[in-house]
Image (cartoon, rainbow, N blue to C red):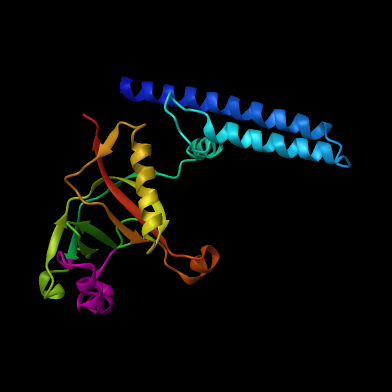
């Protein structure tokens, strides 16, 4: 716990330092703009040169003693964005589910399971966010599980098995459904965010996802379907 608190204090100090630096850069530029006579070509040229100087200052300053060409302004913006909680921890309860079995992506969505699932929606019940299903990935294969009602047996789900899903703690964030780049960026963000908590990724369990509220009015408003990415976690030892 003390280690986590120490990391948070260090992170806060770094953010304050970056904000002060950004404040001075912006205020300096504002003061210059206030004094510029835009009718004079020399003043406009000076303003342009100052803007280039500020760009160089932001981009090329070393950070934490390491040479870096990372844009400093974007780094500050990202750190500020982290102050808006967009990752949460949830606990998924244990539940019974019918499984597709571990298959390739092509076998799953080009095979018999999806049509069977669509014909048997009356067997399923929601688990979280009004969703009954999770798509899990393991060893370059996938498994699609659907939570079933208490009275459902394997005679109802034949030829597919019913399993006991153990549930557990997960870090959750929204990504763009079907977008591998978005998924990778969100995954990296979750990994970075966990560094400031008392949780770590539980590598004994698979990450998983599901579409949330895939309705047309939401897709029209956003331009994409939302997918929740679930990363299994456990307490840091």
Left/right of residue 36 with respect to residue 220 in the rendered view? right
* Nearer-the-camera pick, 81 or 127: 81
Picture residue at 28% right of the left edge, 64% below the top:
125
Question: Residue drawn at (38%, 24%), measured in percent from left and top?
Answer: 7
Depth check: give the residue in front, 1 or 55.
55
Q: Is residue 109 magenta?
A: yes
Q: Residue at x 40, y 44 (%)?
A: 87
From the image, which quarter does the C terminus lie in? Answer: top left
Is residue 92 positioned above or below 192 on the image? below
Can residue 88 be seen here? The reply is: no
Q: Position of residue 108 (x, y in %)?
A: 22, 71
Q: Is residue 26 shown to the viewer in this render?
A: yes
Residue 101 horizontal side relative to residue 27, left or right: left
Picture coordinates of residue 107, whole percent (x, y): 20, 73
In the rendered image, the vertical position of residue 53 relative to residue 164, given as above or below:
above
Snapshot quadrant of residue 199: top left
Of the 4 image quadrants, the one containing the N terminus is: top left
Within the image, what quadrant is residue 178 found in?
bottom left
Q: Is residue 206 left or right of residue 222?
A: left
Looking at the image, is 160 positioned above or below residue 77?
A: below
Task: Determine if the magenta segment contains residue 162.
Answer: no
Magenta segment: 99-125
């Amino acid at each position: 716990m003390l280690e986590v608190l120490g990391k948070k204090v260090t992170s806060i100090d770094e953010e304050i330092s970056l904000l002060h630096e950004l404040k001075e850069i912006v205020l300096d530029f504002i003061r210059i703009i206030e004094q510029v006579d835009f009718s004079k070509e020399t003043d406009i040229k000076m303003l342009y040169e100052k803007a280039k100087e500020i760009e160089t200052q932001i981009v090329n300053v070393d950070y934490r003693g390491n040479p870096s060409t990372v844009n400093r302004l974007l780094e500050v913006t990202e750190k500020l964005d982290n102050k808006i909680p967009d990752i949460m921890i949830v606990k998924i309860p244990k539940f019974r589910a019918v499984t597709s079995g571990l298959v390739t992506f092509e076998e799953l969505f080009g095979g018999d399971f999806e049509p069977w699932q669509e014909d048997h929606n009356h067997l399923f019940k929601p688990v979280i966010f009004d969703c009954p299903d999770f798509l899990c990935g393991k060893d370059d294969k996938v498994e699609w599980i659907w939570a079933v009602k208490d009275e459902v047996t394997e005679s109802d789900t034949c030829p597919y098995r019913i399993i006991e899903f153990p549930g557990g703690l997960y870090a959750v964030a929204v990504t763009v459904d079907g977008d591998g780049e978005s998924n990778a960026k969100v995954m990296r963000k979750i990994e970075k965010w966990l560094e400031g908590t008392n949780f770590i990724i539980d590598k004994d369990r698979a990450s998983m996802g599901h579409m949330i509220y895939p309705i047309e009015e939401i897709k029209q408003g956003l331009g994409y379907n939302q997918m929740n990415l679930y990363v299994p976690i456990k307490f840091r030892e």
